Amino acid sequence: MARRELTLNDHRKFQIDERGQLIWDGQPVVLEQRFTLGWWELRIAGLASIAALIGAVFPIGIHFGWW
């Protein structure tokens, strides 16, 4: 979809419904898109989280003499 600038008349198309949701030209505006990770992606994200935790805790442990 091509982008274009909003005109003054376009601003009149914005509305807010009774729930406080933003409406543009009669359609709700989607402000977020959700996605799900697959099995392998979850594993990789978990390993990356563990590595980041170790990377943060290890220098602190050395500083306090835990190792």
Image (cartoon, rainbow, N blue to C red):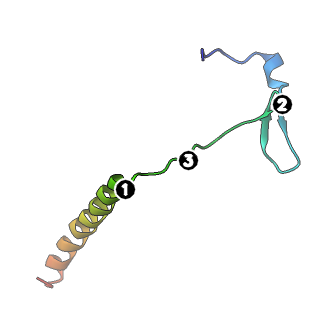
Count every numbered label the image shows and give the total.
3
Q: Which structural element holds mark 2?
A: loop
Q: Which structural element holds mark 3?
A: loop
Instruction: Find the distance from the CA under tag 2 to the CA under tag 3.
Output: 23 Å
| Image point (55%, 47%), residue name | 34
Q: Which residue bears the numbered disc 3?
A: 34
Residue furthest to the left: 67
Marked residue nearer the N-terminal end (3 or 1): 3
Marked residue nearer the N-terminal end (2 or 3): 2
Instruction: Find the distance from the CA under tag 2 to the CA under tag 1.
Output: 38 Å
Q: Which residue bears the numbered disc 1?
A: 39
Q: Judge depth for marks 2 and 1 and give the one in front.
A: 1
Q: x%, y% of residue 44? A: 29, 56
Q: Is residue 38 left or right of residue 65?
A: right
Q: Which amino acid type is shown beneath numbered disc 1?
A: Trp
Q: Is residue 32 above or below residue 55?
A: above
Q: Which amino acid type is shown beneath numbered disc 2?
A: Gly
Q: Quadrant of the C terminus?
A: bottom left
Q: Is residue 60 left or right of residue 6?
A: left
Instruction: Find the distance from the CA under tag 3 to the CA under tag 1.
Output: 17 Å
| Image point (27%, 67%), residue name | 50
Disc 2 packing (10 Å; few <14; some 14–19; many ≥20): few
Q: x%, y% of residue 17? A: 86, 43
Marked residue nearer the N-terminal end (2 or 1): 2
Q: Which residue bears the numbered disc 2?
A: 26
Q: x%, y% of residue 8? A: 80, 17
Answer with the quarter of the image where residue 16 lies.
Answer: top right
| Image point (31%, 59%), residue name | 43
Answer with the quarter of the image where residue 3 lies.
Answer: top right
Q: Which amino acid type is shown beneath numbered disc 3?
A: Arg
Residue furthest to the bottom: 66
